[in-house]
Image (tube, coloured by chain):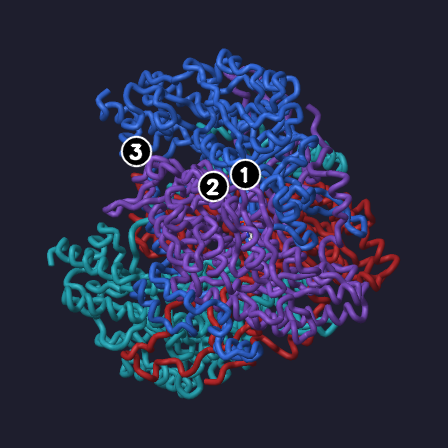
Chain colours: A cyan, B red, C purple, D blue
């Protein structure tokens, strides 16, 4: 008790070494076996003038108890009320099984499954994940994850440029109604390879891509068209027509899809005549907490024809020497550890543990469960739209169907309204003014199956109070 | 059995979702799914049992010694895991207002400060989501720097031939050409070759120190001089920063930019392939280019996000939100547990363990790749002689180790050393465990001499024997096709 | 290796405690420890690895089918575990004021209500900490009842000879003599024998229905009549209440008092030997004797503890606080997940599985102990013939099942059926798993015929082969003596 | 969404059965194999008039999501401030490793280890636990747990009566300063066997047993003397003298010991000339949360001479057919499943999972850790006593050393003061008026290593405010 943070600084170093198991005897006998007098000597190849002093910018160590207390206090400071923010990260119910099992030491503390024989658990699980993701999207193949949805899209763009056999273009046409951070991430990544991204604006009425607008881009030789489903406003673009148009234009169609939507919405493989070519997105809705933004997992699917252009790890099913089924990393010739400068990407560590969680989540939910969750989200959104209309005369900014997220048009700046809602511990949504100045009066609001009727009423009340507070 | 093999139509873990519902009538038909996807239909118990048993088919740090060189498989403190799993962190939306994020931001800001100190850098951005993305950010900053200086002819990145595969892959992803620099027989960069390679086309040099050869690059200051004089910048691949934590700082060695692998040096669990986290640190010259978001502090103190408004020359974002935030929290918790003295011990005891193991293996008859050098946190043995004389390869040794209950070291990396094993015991393994490993290696060497087929046929005690990789790549089976439900 | 074998002097998981301190100077020397106890000195990683690997040497519901009759090894929902692990419950001190306990008390009060409904009893006390303690409470109440009636001559408890061992042990703990009542060849209590056994010395009858023979006692109403007429009370051992959950209520059968095993019927995990929870329910006659504390509700509603002030004739307390509170919360969560329809299904599908398995095993050539009866949630096969003809015992079958990846059924219980296996599949196992078990049993029967030594020598795939129990009891080794540190 | 609790009642039963995996096809084919038309028929041996109707007292089922929400709300209602209540349950730091590992499915969901070959994990762990407990107490043997500290003491009394070879007495002499609930529990249990418990009063000055008082009981033929260490007031009785006196009187000495105290205090085996005969207590301080009172674990130790009188499971080390070391239940002839009416106790299910947690806890702490925690608790207590003295002129009721718990004497009824502290979200301790009317102005306050300097100050401030509030 009374263990103040710095008390630990006084500890006798050799008797108090968290996580280092060496006793003084161990140390002495090991040094003896090496034939040196002290540990310091082991660093004698480092130019003496480079040896650093104490790390004064780092505080003294503390016990787990003190650390947990500190972290609990910090976490408590951030535990505020109820959130209706979606915008790329969604608070779904996570069955307790998911993390109880995913956190087992054998999943949590294994490395990338390079030694296949000693990693069949992880390998088989990823094969199952690949199967689930390919079935959900309707594509033939999935990889074992990339970092997140945004970087997955960047990889898809690079892959699209490589894989398009009909066009040598280094230009990508991208829907203007995708997540703004996705677009920024892609620009950061692809412009280094002299790839250009053009965007298509959205319709002021529907929020979807206006056909007049993208028709203006006809015959301009792009490698790929990127569409988001749902789009950033929760709306549903006419992905069938867009896909056919893109193929018509010798573009690949890259789909960015919220995989939870696929519980009820059309699989990208079935868009238009030929379906999407590359499907990517954020796997977070599958059993992963919003958790301040990560770790999540980027998923990535395509058809076999272009799988050799896919980045990331891929697991294959094969046989062992005795003819028994087993799983192993395959197509490694695409990867940096084999192909180095010629690899499809530099990605190495990916999001394995999140794949584990997502696979368990999808196993628990199945088709029926996923449809049920997606429908509950959707119905909740409709109910909220209805409540806002009836009670507050507040309406969606755009017409047309939405999936579980909507842009509300407010009679004041969304930033102000949201701040006034936050004062009531209701995080009402994302300020669309940050996305586009034209939408400064709009907020993007999300409802998932975790929101009860009472929660929706709380939202409506907080909004009502907030509107008054900002003088409406 | 695959989870799909447990599936039965109509079964389900029905505590997890509501009753069947009518699809929403407002959605146009062309937007609706045409048929079920074919996810497994299984009970909750089947899920628990299937995945629990799958987990038991893995090796892991929690169950085995795992001396995988360059991968730093050390103990992942459960306390750090719990700290990051506090409800306030797990339920916090990444776009929550700053006022509701001060706890989280405080952790990140402090972590930035610690990482600056341990690397000797001027500023840090935590956003890269793994080592490779950190490399990307670093090299992209080098590119942006030359561009801003109007120095457009710098199209080449120099990389020692022993480097990790992500280094050349990153350089290419950033639009550079790669020129390899050879390494001497002592494991150092060949300085003469380097001098010959630099020029006005040199954007920078990527290297790591200690190198992937498991030795410390002694002439690092000279190397830095050569590159800097040529107008290039020095990139430090800090994946193995644990080797020198608290001993020597990359900034002091002359590096301009680096990434570090928090999932190695800062002990966050590897998760069977991630997630990781690869923050970047920069010296003064690259400060304007840091990827966003970064956490800033204002008087109060009040923490806030810095984005492109604050860092106008930023190379930009690398992810939708703040990288692998939860891993950053774990690393922060670990940093607090260790403190400065604990960090100081990391490099020291990792080095003690590696040198001890190297010497003991040598006494058992193994050949060190660099017998005259100090080992760092890892070291290399080469089994070229055993392969030649006994027909037992490094891979055979690796597989046989599995039967002895040890994960294999890294095999065939770096590529330039034939039949090599790169061995990294880490500081969290105790002497007895290391001795057991040494005994096992000795026993396998004996087997290789007396019964080489035994070693070549291994492993025998794993769920499968050696797998047919050629078949895997030829008869691509990447997803289960059948049974699929009828539409 | 034992955890002590990993110990090394001076090692420690030093993130878990402060630096060495001087012992408090105010404590007189005669109160201070004279020497260290000799607990292991190990690192945190060693602890994690040792116990993780130990866990892997267990069978469990999460990894195997576990058809242990009378023990109800069914799926333990992880959600219930999480529910009880909410910080407010875990951190709540048992003596916290009622105002700070309304959430907890609300759960307990509702659980009392549910249990009343499913048992048909008038009142419930949740405090007993396992089935045996529930039995104790129940029989103590019977004793208190007769005593309060001045009925001092009632010194005997009647118990069917097939009963679980806790029944007679409990009766004796409560100061009664036990008189056994035989069971007929059909598995029912021999009513004539019962009539002959009752008398003015009869305090009560303890039985379970369905009985430990795995059949439903058809003449239960008649039995109740006989005992009641003699002035005795009826105790229901509800350890296997899952058999009839939602189908028939013990209160309706005529029982006066019962306990139930929440860790069986309400699916709380068995933890390798507990904890359990054994609430008692009583009819009108015993309501005044319930053990304390009980949860009461006042208008508001406001929940409060009822203790000896409220229940002046209570038999008293059974534990320091409120029994195994956390198990009660898990059971409550499970009850909410199931709801009335889910409870109704428990008995039905448990019974379906048992009857299916019984018939299929019969078709494979096994002998049912009660071939003409319906199985309940469990059933018995007897391997007397196999033992006689092939020299392969029920124990041999049990051990061989382990090699097939199944936990063994309960062996040699009830004692009156020779070479028996008591098999309880539970409602949470799917048909495929049950079929696999049946196949395994068939395969072992075939082995017993063709290679009986194979079965007799089993198991082969466990961490150890059959253990020498005689040596264990003779050369008692109950704690590691060496190495112990010097004082 | 909007899933109200009763919506689930409308579910189609056969398509929505949590935890029951049967499909309609399964059910049909299984019934077919049995040869009955429906499940109902399987219950045809139950007299029809006994079949129950719907369970109207039980609500309809809800999803895990709804259940967790409900439980989170209830738990939140009980999460109030900081507690200084001890009185038999102590809030120590629990290393994260403890429950991460103890909750692994293989520990959590295994049964009692009847099949030794398939239960070596649990069996070896218990053997290690037995070793640790026997080393801590200095006794030769420990069992694998009984329910809790209070019932452990009751079992110890029964055992004492059975084991005392020198006396046939059915009377127990018990210190009056043990936990009142322990005493009540013992009375409930042992009186059924015509065993009587007499108590010895405590000294008004020291809170310990006054020697004059217990000397009065000389030569009265008791089977055993029970002493508590520390006693209920946190004080330390002269256990050496008491042990010698008991032995002198042909009584067995039963010690009820907080095992955490043994980190620094004298092992019962070393009390007096011959040491205690039976040592029991509450294992909760070893890695187990206070958790509203349970599950905890009762521990029980004795010497080999009387081990056959010990209740509960005991694990022995032995060899398998190949001579390999292994572990198994032993001395089962003491237990109900073998010995039935002649067993030493009716105990069957005990507290296995808590044993698992305690074993992991003790492995992490070791001797040094336990000493460190116990010392920190103790120092914290001293610091609090000092603060109360200096700042509030509040003093301990009794003189003499304490371990981590103290009876403060207040200038008002403790019940009122505690209520006024609770209003400030500080649970200041246990009202000793409930224990004994003579102590109506006293509260029993505990400090563990989890309490920081700031916490102690918060206590002192809350107490100051409370004293004012009650008019002192
Ligand atoms: C030396 C080196 N550099 C870079 C990396 C890449 O890091 P990551 O896997 O986190 O992308 C690794 C990790 O494998 C490495 O060992
Ligand atoms: C029929 C029967 N009665 C009583 C008990 C005793 O219950 P517990 O082990 O919870 O004390 C059991 C459990 O083994 C049982 O099966």
Would you say B103 lies left or right of D378 here? left
Q: Position of residue B283 (x, y in %)?
A: 47, 47
* Residue on which disc 3 sits: D422
**Whether marks 2 and 3 lie on the same chain:** no
Give the residue at x 49% y 60%.
Answer: C220
Instruction: Determine crowd level at label 1: few under 14, some 14-19, many 20+ residues with C-alpha closer than 10 A.
Output: some
Indicate which label's residue lies in the foreground, 2 or 3. 2
Give the residue at x 45% y 76%.
Answer: A137
Q: Position of residue B80 (x, y in %)?
A: 49, 46
**Whether marks 1 and 2 lie on the same chain:** yes
Quick one: SS at disc 3? Answer: helix
Q: Position of residue A457 (x, y in %)?
A: 22, 60
Q: Position of residue B208 (x, y in %)?
A: 60, 51
Quick one: SS at disc 2? Answer: helix
Distance from disc 2 to disc 3, alpha carbons, whole Å, reads 41 Å
Visible in this render: residue D239? yes
Q: Is residue C65 above or below residue A305?
A: above
Quick one: SS at disc 1? Answer: loop
Q: Quadrant of residue D433?
A: top left
Image quadrant occupied by the N terminus of chain B: bottom right
Q: Residue furthest top?
A: D212
Q: Is residue B51 above or below residue B404?
A: below
Q: In the image, which disc is placed on residue C143?
A: 2
């Amino acid at each position: 008790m009374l263990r103040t943070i710095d008390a630990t600084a006084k500890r006798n170093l050799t008797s108090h070494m968290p996580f280092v198991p060496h006793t003084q005897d161990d140390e002495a006998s090991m040094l003896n076996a090496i034939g040196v007098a002290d540990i310091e000597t082991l660093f004698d190849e480092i130019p003496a003038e480079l040896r650093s002093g104490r790390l004064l910018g780092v505080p003294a160590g503390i016990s787990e108890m003190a650390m947990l207390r500190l972290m609990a206090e910090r976490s408590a400071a951030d535990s505020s009320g109820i959130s209706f923010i979606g915008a790329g990260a969604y608070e779904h119910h996570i069955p307790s099984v998911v993390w109880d099992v995913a956190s087992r030491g054998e999943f949590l503390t294994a490395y990338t499954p390079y030694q296949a024989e000693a990693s069949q658990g992880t390998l088989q699980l990823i094969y199952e994940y690949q199967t689930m993701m390919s079935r959900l999207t309707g594509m033939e193949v999935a990889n074992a994850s990339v970092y997140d949805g945004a970087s997955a899209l960047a990889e898809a763009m690079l892959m699209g440029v490589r894989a398009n056999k009909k066009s040598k273009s280094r230009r990508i046409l991208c829907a203007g109604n995708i997540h703004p951070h996705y677009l920024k991430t892609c620009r950061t990544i692809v412009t280094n390879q002299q790839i250009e991204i053009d965007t298509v604006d959205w319709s002021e009425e529907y929020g979807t891509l206006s056909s007049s607008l993208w028709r203006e881009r006809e015959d301009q030789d792009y490698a790929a068209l990127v569409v988001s489903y749902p789009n950033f406003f929760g709306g549903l673009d006419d992905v069938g027509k867009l896909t056919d148009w893109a193929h018509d234009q010798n573009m690949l169609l890259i789909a960015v899809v919220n995989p939870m939507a696929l519980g009820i919405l059309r699989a990208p493989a079935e868009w238009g005549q030929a379906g999407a070519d590359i499907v990517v997105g954020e796997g977070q809705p599958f059993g992963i907490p919003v958790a301040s933004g990560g770790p999540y997992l980027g998923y990535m699917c395509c058809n076999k024809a272009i799988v050799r252009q896919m980045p990331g790890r891929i697991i294959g099913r094969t046989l062992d020497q005795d003819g028994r089924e087993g799983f192993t990393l395959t197509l490694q010739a695409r990867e940096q550890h084999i192909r180095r400068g010629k690899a499809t990407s530099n990605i190495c560590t990916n999001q394995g543990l999140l794949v584990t969680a997502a696979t368990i989540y999808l196993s628990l939910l199945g088709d029926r469960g996923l449809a049920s969750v997606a429908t509950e989200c959707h119905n909740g959104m409709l109910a909220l739209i209805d409540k806002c209309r009836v009670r507050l005369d507040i309406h969606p900014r755009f017409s047309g169907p939405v999936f579980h997220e909507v842009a509300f048009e407010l009679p004041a700046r969304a930033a102000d309204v949201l701040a006034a809602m936050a004062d009531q511990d209701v995080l009402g949504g994302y300020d669309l003014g940050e996305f586009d100045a034209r939408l400064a009066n709009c907020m993007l609001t999300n409802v998932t199956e975790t929101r009860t009727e009472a929660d929706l009423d709380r939202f409506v009340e907080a909004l009502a109070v907030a509107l008054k507070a900002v003088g409406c | 059995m695959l989870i799909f093999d447990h599936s039965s139509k109509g079964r389900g873990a029905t505590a997890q979702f509501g009753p069947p519902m009518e699809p929403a009538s407002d959605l146009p038909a062309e937007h609706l799914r045409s048929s079920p996807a074919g996810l497994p239909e299984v009970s909750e118990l089947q899920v628990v049992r299937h995945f629990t048993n799958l987990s038991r088919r893995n090796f892991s740090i929690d169950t085995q010694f795992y001396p995988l060189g360059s991968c730093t498989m050390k103990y992942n403190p459960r306390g750090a895991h719990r700290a990051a799993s506090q409800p306030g962190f797990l339920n916090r939306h990444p776009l929550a207002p700053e006022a509701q994020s001060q706890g989280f931001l405080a952790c990140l800001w402090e972590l930035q400060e610690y990482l600056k100190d341990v690397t000797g850098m001027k500023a840090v951005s935590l956003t890269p989501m793994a080592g490779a993305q950190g490399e990307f950010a670093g090299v992209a900053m080098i590119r942006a720097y030359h561009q801003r200086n109007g120095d457009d002819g710098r199209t080449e990145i120099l990389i020692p031939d022993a480097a990790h595969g992500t280094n050349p892959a990153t350089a290419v992803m950033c639009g550079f050409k790669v020129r390899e620099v050879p390494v001497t027989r002592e494991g150092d960069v060949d300085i003469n070759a380097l001098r010959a390679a630099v020029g006005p086309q040199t954007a920078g040099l990527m290297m790591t120190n200690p190198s992937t050869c498991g030795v410390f690059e002694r002439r690092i200051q000279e190397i830095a001089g050569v590159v800097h004089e040529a107008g290039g910048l020095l990139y430090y691949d800090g994946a193995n920063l644990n080797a020198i934590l608290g001993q020597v700082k990359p900034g002091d060695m002359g590096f301009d930019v680096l990434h570090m692998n928090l999932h190695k040096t800062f002990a966050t669990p590897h998760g069977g392939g991630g997630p990781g986290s690869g923050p970047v640190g920069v010296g003064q010259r690259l400060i304007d280019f840091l990827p966003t978001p970064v956490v800033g502090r204002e008087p109060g103190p009040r923490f806030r996000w810095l984005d492109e408004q604050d860092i106008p020359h930023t190379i930009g974002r690398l992810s939708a939100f703040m990288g692998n935030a939860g891993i950053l929290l774990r690393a922060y918790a670990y940093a607090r547990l260790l403190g400065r003295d604990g960090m100081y011990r990391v490099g020291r005891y990792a080095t003690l363990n590696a040198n001890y193991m190297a010497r003991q293996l040598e006494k058992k008859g193994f050949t060190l790749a660099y017998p005259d050098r100090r080992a760092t946190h890892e070291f290399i043995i080469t089994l070229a002689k055993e392969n030649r004389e006994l027909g037992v390869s490094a891979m055979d040794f690796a597989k046989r180790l599995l039967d002895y209950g040890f994960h294999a070291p890294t095999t065939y990396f770096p590529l330039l050393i034939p039949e090599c094993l790169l061995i990294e015991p880490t500081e969290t393994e105790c002497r007895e465990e290391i001795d057991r490993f040494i005994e096992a290696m000795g026993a396998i060497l004996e087997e290789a001499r007396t019964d080489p087929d035994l070693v070549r046929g291994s492993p025998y005690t794993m769920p499968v024997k050696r797998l047919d990789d050629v078949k895997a790549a030829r008869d691509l089976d990447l997803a289960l096709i059948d049974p699929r439900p009828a539409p």
